[in-house]
Image: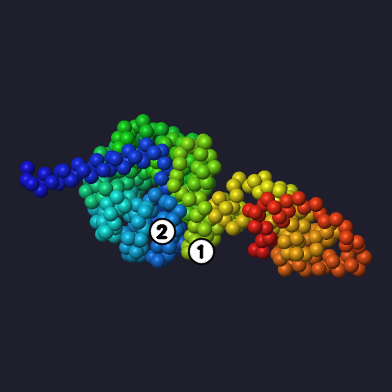
Amino acid sequence: MSRSTFLEQVSRRVTDSIRQAVIGHHKKSGAVLFSDTTLRDGEQMPGATLEPFEKLRIARALQDAGIHSLDAGFPASSEADVEAIRMMIGVITRPVLTALCRTVRSDIDAADRALEGNPPHKRGVSLFCGTSPLHREYKLCKSKTEVLGIIEQTVGYAAEKFRIVAFSPEDASRTEVDFLCECYRTAIRAGATTIGFPDTVGFLTPEKSRTFMRAIRDGVPELEKALLAVHFHNDLGLAVANTLACIEEGANVVQCTVNGIGERAGNASLEEVVMALTLHKDQYGRHHRIDTTKLAPLCQLVAELTGVQIPLMKPIGGNNIFATEAGIHQDGLLKNPDTYLPFRPEKVGAGGISLVLGRHSGRKAVAHRLSELGLPCFDEDVIAVVELIKRQPKGVVIDEASLRRLSQQASEARRSSGANQYSAKISGHGIGHGNDGAVAGGTNAG
Ligand code: MN
């Protein structure tokens, strides 16, 4: 054996033992590792194109939020992706940066060049190859044996250049389960450190996702040497539910996007998965390293830079999540915000609770707001203003200016009718002072 071959073998063995130590550590810790794909799968959404400097801004925010790895782009497909990745080198230092590759050597070479300079434990590739009958027959025109050969060769090639190599059988959820397991076994033997389970067309239910996880666990003994990652699309509105089901079944890595943006109906939403895990730690028994107070600002940033607006009712990031117009809810929130919220705004870094004044609002919220603005708020004032609000046209939200105007109208009406202004204030225990610092109060003008 020549000296160089000997050294190569030693270095390969050292790399292998480092790989195994890292994987063993992650598995033993029980952590759910978040791999964000906002900048790659998210950006694939029509109209969500990002400039490289915008990707860098989002990558920084994801890094601050504590993401484990970042699907930074598809170097072989786009020069802009290469540029964005180059901007991240040396700046995005905490998460692992990964690049997407087809199972072709030139893609792996392009990823290698794009990620040059990032330390070995912070750079990886994510290889994908269609494995379902539809993909084999119509897209690749390859037999099962040929697909296995491609996986073996390209994963092996990637493992020579990268310490971190993920392999995902595209359309895994519509692949025959025996063949799927064979693909995984081949990939791990060839050097994959993570195997992915993508529900590429967002087709599964939580129960069927669980069944897949169990089948993979049983059919891939090599899995003790690799991490299992899941990637769900939201075509049935089940991406988050499926992701959580797989976490319960032992998935190590979850791939998500901020605001759930992505192809068609989008991907599993990062912020929703994080909050479900956070609030139900007793059920999942798994920890994560995401700082939940960074979530709402992250959602805003992604919406702003992609131009994809957050729907009003979108969990975690939507504008209505901490806003209510209903009198009974407003009264409860003023007494204790937890009465009508699953978590407080500060938990996700959101601005605060908005008590929106409108036709559904009651006296307590109106009194609270009048007192905040220093407007008259005796019983009669409040009753008169509530009456005026109820007469407003459908859909009108009372902002500060209109509340001032209505208060003025009510006062004038009362003065002209000679009402007694020394009567008692609306009993406002806990309203506007004291124990509800979390209530930022105020109407929502928009
Ligand atoms: Mn996808």
Residue at 91%, 63% (x, y): give it: 419
Q: Which residue is mark 2?
A: 59
Disc 2 residue type (three-letter) = Ala
Instruction: Give coordinates of residue 74: x percent, y percent.
Output: 34, 57
Residue 380 appears at what percent x and percent y? 85, 59
Amino acid found under the numbered disc labelled 1: Glu
The N terminus: image quadrant: top left
Residue 33 placed where, x, y %? 41, 45
Task: Decide which of 277, 238 is in the foreground and name it.
Answer: 277
Label 2 and label 1: CA atoms lie apart by: 14 Å
Dot 2 or dot 1: first in sequence order is 2
Residue that sits furthest to the front in the current view: 434
Using residue 74 as the reference point, say whether residue 266 is left or right of it.
Answer: right
Quarter containing the C terminus: bottom right
- CB at disc 2 and ligand 1 closer than 8 Å: no
Front: mark 2 or 1 = 2
**Which residue is identified by label 1?**
304
Q: Residue at x 39, y 49 (%)?
A: 68
